[in-house]
Image: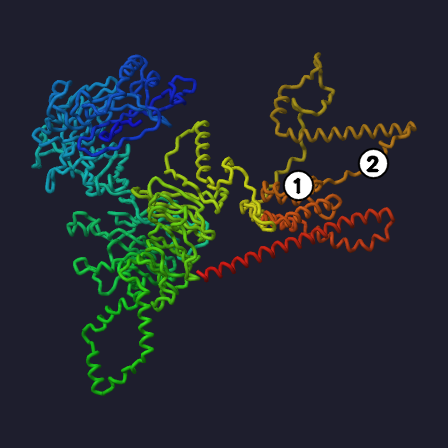
């Protein structure tokens, strides 16, 4: 439910009444005393609601949670933290229960004001109580505050309080009195306690209501500062209902009653330095954007002619300083930091937060730091490249901070060009348009100040890193302006000449260039030396960035008239006329006359002239320009549905020009690395033009397709590799297109239509600006930190709703977290739903997708992350890099003699000593100190090892003693006693892979091996393959495992599935066991000759071993042949595909 009902009501102020513990139910439909309820620290707010008496509609404020308080009032009886007491608990419950009917009051009643008490928890806002101001029906509240030490009371200021109400205190009266109106309300009882008369007396005789606009509590108890719409500030003692003195900001030259001097905010300074200087500063913010700082300490008024206030006839207050136009559009809020000479100010329309410091001897303030944004929604944003020249290697992976900077151009009414850093906000700043603009504006007497001297809104930018260190690297064009301006991204200021034609006047007082010369598009050459500017008339001008001099036009004859006029211009020292007279005198003027041209030559020139006439934009707007990476070709597109190719050096049109498009062009973007052009058309489609083939190679969002935009395209951007194209539209959606397959792979929708977009250097982040929003939204690509499976044959059936960033709760319950996770998963499933009816809708996105070839013999990839198999090729390098930088420190040597002391838990046998006594119960009389020392001994481990060795030595001595005795008496010793135990055989560790290979060999199916290794990391795979065979000495067991592993790789290669992963496994297997396999091959040839010289039994055993080795070698040879065949097949298919692409591109 909404807090206010109807479009004529709105919330004018919010008061924080403190925090308190409330019993919040987990189920909003049950009462607070349920089994699932819990105590939570909630905030109590008082919302001041007012009826709009002007007639403009005010949207209600939506809230979250349940607002029915019929069952929760017993547990939530406290309305603020100042009223917590056990004596008044029952009275409070009774009062709250008596006001239950207030929730159902219709806001269309006679009163113009209402106070709503709400309790705000982490997850919901609950309406606790409604207090209609029915006793003062004509009073319209505008502002309120909670005075210090006034329990359960709020001070409300407004206008329209009738005289009958102020005199009687109840009932309704007719006719509203003039002046500032203020009343004191008890929120517990819902009654108006007092109507203040002091301000009405002050404003007696004024015309109309002097509405109260702000209230501020002073450091002194019972004293409140009241600001009014006429520019007056009153210091009022609310306990005595007396006005102490007033400060006037609405008098003087240029004042009026249009509300420009209305007081918007007040703040008192409370730091110790102000007390040391004997001042009591009060900061006053006004609607005209100025901030005034007053000293409230009374001064002598003997030498002053100012009118004294009635409360202090012999005293005056001093204006310490005044900061004019600190916030253009008005001051929103002022706040002195506690115990600091720092003032925070925010603007109502300037979108700025400024911190002022007052450390000057004259108590004036200066700006310490500030955060400023656009005052209008940005219309164009672009990521700025490195300012060091060229694209650095560190920028490719996003480690350079320059890759985190975004250039932003303000919208309508905002002439600023700003740079925002996504890494450090301290780097945000506005590009300078010149020094001393504020001073210049004051000298010229401009009403708008500095804003009247700034350039118009930026409509196009172009940036190049090639010559950043030499001259300006950024060119901007502006709305309804013919000239272009050069900026430096290093200096963050305008740096360089103004790009204009020689006949164009710079001064605004002179004749301006024609409207057809207004710039509409801009581009910079790859070398960084030239800039080309497109105009509304279809002419393209070329300039040198270093000097600013014009270097011709496209077409060439566009500047011939001006060049001819400049050539014939009469200047001092011009000898052209004298030269002509001299030529006629010497009769040599006829020597330069050309011979008459033949008829065929004239016709060829006429055809060429007609072709050149067609290859130009005639009275059409040039909407996009681009120069290829070799500075050979310039491409221009216009609103006449033409794409024209120009020679950048000769300014002549290409023989293929013009290329006719299906609809007039709207915008064009250029991918420098791949030399691809994306051109958006008025029919909401996008054409992709290739510089290398000089033809259109792709068409996206065409009219016959079901996957397309339904509104004009606002902006476009290429991915870093040129394989993805991002398009945004005014239909509120953003689509991602896969360029090679010409399919839509992602579809997003926003609450507000995106007006511009830009991708970071790495492609990880997407920045968007939206209609009606001042901020820039930053989105992250999920494919950078999780595996995303894309199916180009089935585009998204519905868009994914992109949520705006919101503040997170401090804590979240497990149930809430699980519900939110399930909701996110459900929305993700719906956004990725496949429209094909043949696919089962019950399949979850978490189910594993089985990749099968569309035809037998085709090669398929595994779809595993690249890090899984790429690291196997460089595992030695990774291990070397991960080695500890410092050597392992050797432990300090133990002392030569170790003292042994038995403890309570010692396992060593107790040895009786002659001096040891035994108690009657069989326990030894050990000293307590020995037990305590043994329990805290640090040598427990060494002692236990020593005891174990001593025990083994005792056992050996006893056995030797028994054998000696048996020999003396003539007993025959047993075999067990005299036979030496055999040396234990060395056993090698085998991984789980070895057992799985043996199991799969019996089933003759090795698919589970590939699945098992796919679930392991690179290091685990290396260990599993290494333990199959530990060298030539381990061939008795390891030879069979090598054979089984070779059979698995052979089967995987022949199946041609999981191609890249199997190749990585094969490379690692051969890299580890290459020495062993080579040793098997060499030893096989040597032992062939030695087998014949051995006995028959040994000969049979060796023949069997030789047979096993020969099988391993044969399997390795088959593996080599199978891998070679698969590689040749893949190489031939790729070559065939490239040939077909080249053939088709020439046919378009």
Q: Which residue is mark 2?
A: 980
Q: Are marks 2 and 1 in contact (CB under 8 Å)?
A: no
Q: Which residue is at a point 31% across and 69% down the rendered structure image?
A: 610
Image quadrant where one finds the N terminus: top left
Can residue 72 be seen at all in this image of the molecule? Answer: yes
Disc 2 element = loop
Rendering coords of residue 122 (x, y %): 37, 27
Image quadrant where one finds the C terminus: bottom left
- Residue placed most toward the observer, 1018 or 314: 1018
Q: Residue furthest right?
A: 970
Q: Is residue 203 above or below residue 1053?
A: above
- Residue placed most toward the observer, 154 or 249: 154
Rendering coords of residue 123 (x, y %): 37, 27
Q: Which residue is mark 1?
A: 993
Rendering coords of residue 483 (x, y %): 26, 59
Disc 1 element = helix
Label whose residue precedes the other's in the sequence (2 or 1)? 2
Q: Is residue 725 above or below residue 260?
A: below
């Amino acid at each position: 439910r909404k807090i206010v009902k109807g479009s004529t009501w709105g919330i004018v102020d919010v008061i924080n009444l403190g925090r308190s513990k409330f019993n919040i139910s987990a189920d909003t439909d049950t009462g607070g005393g349920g089994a699932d309820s819990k105590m939570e620290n909630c905030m109590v707010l008082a919302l001041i609601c007012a009826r709009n008496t002007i007639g403009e509609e005010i949207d209600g404020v939506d809230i979250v949670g349940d607002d029915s308080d019929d069952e929760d009032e017993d547990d939530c009886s406290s309305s603020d933290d100042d009223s917590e007491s056990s004596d008044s608990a029952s009275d409070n419950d009774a009062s709250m229960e008596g006001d239950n009917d207030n929730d159902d009051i219709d806001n269309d009643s006679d009163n113009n004001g209402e106070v709503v008490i709400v309790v705000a928890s982490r997850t919901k806002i609950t309406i606790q109580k409604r207090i209609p101001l029915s006793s003062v029906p004509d009073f319209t509240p505008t502002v309120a505050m909670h005075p210090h030490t006034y329990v359960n009371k709020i001070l409300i200021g407004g206008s329209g309080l009738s005289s009958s109400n102020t005199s009687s205190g109840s009932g309704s009266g007719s006719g509203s009195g003039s002046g500032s109106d203020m009343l004191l309300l008890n929120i517990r009882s819902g009654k108006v306690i007092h109507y203040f008369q002091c301000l009405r007396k002050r404003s007696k005789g004024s015309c109309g209501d002097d509405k109260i606009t702000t209230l501020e509590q002073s450091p002194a108890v019972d004293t409140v500062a009241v600001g009014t719409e006429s520019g007056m500030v009153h210091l009022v003692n609310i306990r005595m209902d007396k006005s102490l003195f007033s400060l006037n900001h609405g008098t003087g030259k240029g004042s009026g009653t249009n509300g420009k001097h209305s007081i918007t905010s007040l703040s008192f300074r409370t730091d110790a330095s102000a007390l040391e200087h004997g001042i009591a500063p009060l900061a006053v913010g006004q609607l005209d954007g100025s901030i005034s700082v007053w000293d409230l300490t009374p001064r002598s008024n003997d030498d002053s002619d100012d009118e004294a206030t009635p409360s202090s006839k012999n005293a005056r207050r001093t204006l310490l300083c005044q900061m004019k136009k600190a916030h253009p559009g008005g001051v929103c809020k002022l706040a002195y930091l506690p115990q600091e000479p720092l003032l925070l100010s925010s603007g109502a329309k300037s979108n700025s937060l400024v911190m002022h410091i007052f450390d000057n001897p004259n108590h004036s303030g200066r700006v310490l730091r500030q955060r400023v944004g656009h005052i209008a929604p940005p219309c164009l944003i672009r990521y700025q490249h490195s300012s060091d020249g060229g694209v650095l290697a560190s920028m490719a992976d996003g480690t350079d901070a320059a890759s985190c900077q975004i250039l932003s151009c303000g919208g309508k009414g905002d002439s600023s060009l700003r740079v925002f850093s996504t890494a450090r906000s301290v780097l945000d700043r506005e590009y300078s348009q010149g020094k001393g603009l504020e001073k210049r504006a004051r000298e010229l007497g401009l009403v708008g100040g500095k804003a009247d001297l700034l350039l118009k809104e930026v409509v196009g930018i172009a940036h190049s890193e090639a010559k950043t260190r030499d001259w300006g690297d950024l060119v901007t064009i502006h709305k309804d302006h013919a000239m272009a301006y050069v900026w430096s991204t290093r200096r963050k200021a305008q740096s360089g000449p103004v790009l204009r034609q020689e006949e164009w006047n710079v001064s605004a007082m002179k004749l301006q260039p024609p409207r057809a010369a207004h710039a509409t598009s801009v581009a910079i050459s790859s070398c960084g030396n030239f800039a080309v500017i497109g105009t509304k008339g279809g002419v393209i001008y070329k300039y040198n960035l270093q000097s600013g001099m014009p270097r011709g036009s496209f077409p060439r004859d566009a500047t011939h008239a001006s060049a001819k006029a400049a050539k014939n211009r009469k200047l001092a020292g011009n000898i052209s006329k004298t030269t002509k007279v001299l030529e006629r005198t010497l009769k040599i003027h006829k020597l330069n006359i050309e011979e008459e041209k033949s008829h065929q030559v004239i016709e060829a020139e006429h055809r060429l002239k007609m072709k050149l006439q067609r290859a130009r934009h005639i009275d059409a707007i040039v909407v996009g320009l681009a120069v290829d990476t070799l500075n050979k070709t310039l491409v221009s597109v216009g609103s006449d549905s033409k794409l024209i190719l120009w020679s950048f050096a000769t300014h002549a049109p290409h023989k293929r020009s013009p290329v006719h498009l299906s609809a007039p062009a709207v915008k064009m973007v250029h991918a420098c690395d791949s030399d691809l052009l994306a051109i958006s058309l008025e029919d909401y489609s996008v054409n992709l033009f290739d510089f290398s083939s000089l033809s259109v190679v792709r068409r996206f969002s065409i009219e016959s397709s079901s996957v397309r935009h339904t509104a004009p395209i606002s902006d476009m951007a290429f991915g870093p590799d040129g394989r993805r194209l991002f398009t945004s539209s005014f239909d509120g959606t953003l689509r991602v297109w896969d360029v090679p397959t010409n399919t839509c792979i992602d579809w997003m929708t926003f609450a507000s239509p995106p007006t511009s977009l830009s991708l970071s250097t790495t492609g990880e982040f997407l920045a968007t600006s939206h209609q009606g929003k001042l901020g820039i939204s930053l989105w992250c690509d999920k494919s950078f930190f999780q595996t995303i499976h894309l199916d180009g044959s089935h585009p998204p059936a519905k868009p994914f709703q992109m949520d705006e960033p919101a503040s997170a709760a401090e804590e979240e319950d497990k149930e809430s977290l699980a519900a939110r996770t399930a909701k996110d998963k459900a929305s993700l499933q719906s956004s990725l739903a496949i429209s094909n009816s043949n696919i089962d809708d019950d399949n979850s996105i978490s189910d594993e997708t089985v990749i099968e070839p569309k035809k037998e013999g085709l090669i398929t990839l595994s779809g595993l992350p690249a890090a899984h198999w790429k690291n196997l090729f460089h595992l030695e390098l990774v291990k070397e890099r991960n080695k500890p930088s410092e050597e392992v420190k050797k432990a300090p040597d133990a002392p030569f003699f170790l003292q042994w002391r038995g403890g309570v838990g010692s396992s060593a046998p107790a040895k009786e000593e002659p001096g040891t006594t035994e108690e009657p119960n069989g326990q030894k009389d050990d000293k307590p100190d020995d037990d305590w020392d043994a329990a805290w001994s640090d040598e427990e481990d060494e002692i236990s090892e020593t005891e174990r060795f001593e025990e083994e030595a005792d056992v050996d001595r006893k056995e030797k003693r028994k054998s000696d005795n048996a020999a003396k008496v003539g007993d025959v010793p047993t075999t067990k006693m005299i036979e030496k135990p055999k040396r234990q055989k060395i056993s090698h560790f085998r991984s789980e892979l070895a057992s799985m290979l043996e199991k799969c060999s019996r089933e003759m199916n090795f698919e589970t091996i590939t699945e098992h290794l796919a679930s392991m990391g690179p290091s685990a795979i290396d260990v599993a393959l290494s333990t199959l065979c530990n060298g030539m000495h381990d061939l008795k067991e390891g030879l069979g495992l090598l054979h089984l592993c070779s059979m698995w790789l052979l089967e995987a290669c022949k199946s041609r599935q999981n191609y890249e992963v199997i190749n990585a496994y094969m490379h690692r297997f051969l890299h580890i066991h290459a020495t062993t396999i080579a040793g098997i091959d060499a030893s096989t040839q040597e032992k062939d000759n030695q087998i014949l010289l051995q006995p028959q039994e040994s000969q049979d055993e060796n023949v069997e071993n030789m047979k096993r080795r020969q099988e391993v070698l044969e399997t390795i040879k088959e593996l080599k042949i199978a891998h070679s065949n698969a590689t040749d097949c893949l190489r031939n298919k790729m070559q065939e595909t490239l040939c077909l692409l080249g053939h088709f591109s020439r046919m378009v």
